[in-house]
Image (cartoon, rainbow, N blue to C red):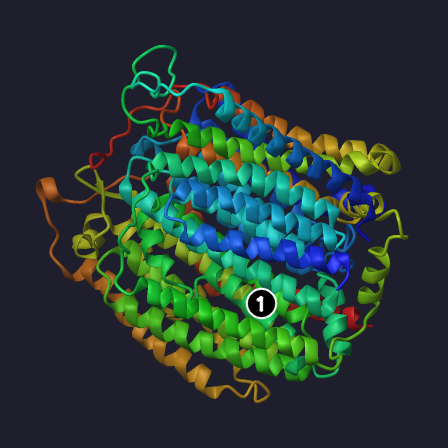
Amino acid sequence: MLNPYIPVLILMAVAVAVAAGMSVATSLIARIFRLRRPNPIKSQPYECGMTPIGGARVRFSVKFYLVAMLFILFDVEAIFLYPWAVVHRHLGWLGLVEMGLFIGILAAGYLYLWKRGAFEWD
Amino acid sequence: MQITPRDIWNISPHLVVAALGLIILLIDAIWPRISKRQLANLALLGLIGAGALQARFWPRGQVTPVLGGMIVPDGYTAFFNLVLLVGAGISLLLSTDYLEWDGSAHGEYHALVLFTAFGGMVMAAAGHLIVVFLGLEILSISLYILAGYQRERRESQEAALKYFLLGAFASAFFLYGMALVYGYAGSLDLHAIARAAGAGQGAAANQLLLTGIGLLLVGFGFKVAVVPFHIWTPDVYEGAPTSATAFMSVVAKAAGFAAFVRVFALAFPGADLRHQVGAVVASIAMLTMVVGNTAAVLQTNIKRLLAYSSIAHAGYILVGVVAVLRNPAAPAEGVSAVLFYTLAYTFMNLGAFAVVLALRRRGEELLNIEEYAGLGFRYPWLGALMALFMLSLAGMPPTAGFFAKLYLIRAALSPLVGMWWLVITLALTSVVSFYYYIRVVTVMYMRPAVEGEQAPQASAGPHLGTGLALAALGTILLGLIPAGILQAAQQIAEGLVELGGMALR
Amino acid sequence: MNVANLGFFLVAGLSIVSAGFVIFHPNPVRSALFLVVNFICLAILYLTLNAQLLAALQVIVYAGAIMVLFLFVIMLLNLGGERAREDALAGQKFAGGFLALVVLGALSVGLYQVVSAKETRPVTDAWRLEQMRFQAPPGKEGEVQIAQIGSELFRNYLYPFELTSVLLLVGLIGAVLLAKRRLPEQSQPEGQRRDRP
């Protein structure tokens, strides 16, 4: 039943093996050949040569919320394109009109967002 | 499936309302300086147009479903769509002055009102549970936004959050119920469900089906605010902008009951099953009437009072639903009582909110019932209208509310229903309801008025005045000539029953 | 036990373990990442049930979009610290555990009844049609499935499909109206309400 997925599975296995192998191999090789002379400046996290200040965890601005919400809404829109793309030849003009209406309504929503300043960062 | 011009014609009222919502949204976004009053007028014009289109289906319509069984353009649909259009229209009339005064008149408000009405119309017309669900979601999400419309007020934010969280939960219940019913029947088409439930031996004992029906009941129960799914109602009604409260109190109820009655009257035939479901609905109805009316007695805020009153009225309407379920000989009687009640409730409740929306005191809304003292003499017209709406909500003859209750009782009294205790509860709780409705009237007429700075002010512009007049006209006309509307309602109800019979063939 | 069964138990076990980590890991960011693992396991289970579209949606919507929102909210609330938080309500853990056991029990009983029951479901035309519609010829499962769903969605379910766009539109309005910090100025006068903050 899962036959079509066996190539995918093999590809995945190879990808995982290559990634894991490379990281393990490089760290092993480095362990064998490297010198070990740590000092405090070396062990700091790298931040473009600046001295790092404060933690890496900063509070995100709530403005990102709108971006995330809009992403989800348009993501859901995109999902409907997937089955449509598979069958649009069979659907003919009706399918085109249907999808046109669907996207048209959401394009109107997009226009609304634009004009209302939802994409502006203030 | 082929789409014919006939199909488009059948759903034309829906399309007009949705398209108008979109147009208003875009006009407002592109020309932000446009007068919001003009937008409201445009929306009203569109609602009247949609109403005119819809009236062509009155009162019988076409009973064969269109668009692959998704939409049933019958008289039942026409009735509820007209109720929803009237409710949305009067609400828009009531809201313009209030929003200007509040300083929050954006075009989105009008667009959202139209989308809510659209969602409700879809629910009323649905012949398929997926369409019911999508309509329910369009209606609900628009209402969540309207509840949180006054972004600067904490109460409004709280209302939106509470409504949204509980509403999303209720939608999930509904969806789960749909899934279980699908598991039983293999389809979500109401006719196909009816065939499966009618053919299945022991449908009344099938746990899959019964659980599914129970979960659907939770979903509908939340939307129309019946006990024990009513907890959100007072807080949301109090926190939401008053104009939005007025709107949601009538439109969510009408749309919710429209889909509720259609689904339960069509999809689950079989006397045993109906008997069983009817018993559950009856106990919910009793609980709702008792809790709603007793809690309303304790309220001092008019918006909370009207919230509990709306819960109580949902309980009364449920009595009609019980009559539909438990009277196989004449289910049409229950359906027509529900139809009449919904229409009457729309007029009288919007009227009561219209009076609340007209009143101010020192730059604030006048919400404390005690502050209505002397209003009857200070503003005789407003006082008289408020008294009319309160008496009608209480069910005093010869107002609309009285006949609405009378028809419900008549439908539920049939010996086949066998629920005399339900009718007694209805009568007793109505007596209790007189206490708190009449209290508003006595405060208005029996208490001395406050003068000077603290005195309440009334302001009714042309929009609000028209809305108030329409609500009053509806309340009085339904009280004076109830027979005409009832006859039409009966005809519509028979159409629905006939549809149910067709489904089984 | 054949290979397919082994695969199922592997993925199912992984999904349960990752779900456990979602609940019990003290660091919320890592909980969220374990949730991604859980979503992907579910997607694989959908594939084994021959529901390809559902699997794709699970990855695109849940592992993609919903996860972004989860992580965003975690960052917004600044829950990064790895500290055990006190429960807001006393006995919350106990009550939650108890309710979870009740649900587990109810589901088990329900499953048992369904598995052991004699056929009480009516075999209607609708059911037969449904079964016929979703049986693909062997070897062509993926393609045919999505095409079938597509032609269902865009023919019979045309109106619900268009309704979805209105639903999404209303969602857009809500996101802007409730989450946008400042809306651009409009023509309206200030309003006379005095109890505004």
- Vertical placement of B341 versus A50: above or below? below
Pinpoint residue A21: horizontal percent, then vertical percent.
Answer: 62, 32
The quadrant of the picture occupied by the C terminus of chain C is top left
Residue B492 visible in the snapshot: yes
- Could you tell me residue C175's position as x and y percent? 46, 34
Report the amino acid beneath label 1.
Leu
Q: Nearer the viewer, residue C55 or C120?
A: C55
Q: Residues within 10 Å of mark 1 (few under 14, many from 20)?
A: many
Residue projecting furthest to the right: C137
The residue that appears at 85% across and 38% down in the rendered structure is A91
Quarter location, residue C49:
bottom right
Choose top left, top right, bottom left or bottom right for residue B322: bottom right
- Residue on which the image places disc 1: B486
Which residue occupies 42% across, 65% down? Answer: B229
Residue closer to the observer: A41 or B267 = A41
Q: Looking at the figure, which quarter contains the N terminus of chain C?
A: bottom right
Residue appearing at x 81%, y 73% in the figure: C123
Which chain does the numbered disc 1 sit on?
A: B
- Residue B365's quadrant in the figure? top left
A103 with respect to A85 (left or right): left
State whether residue B371 is above or below residue B192: above
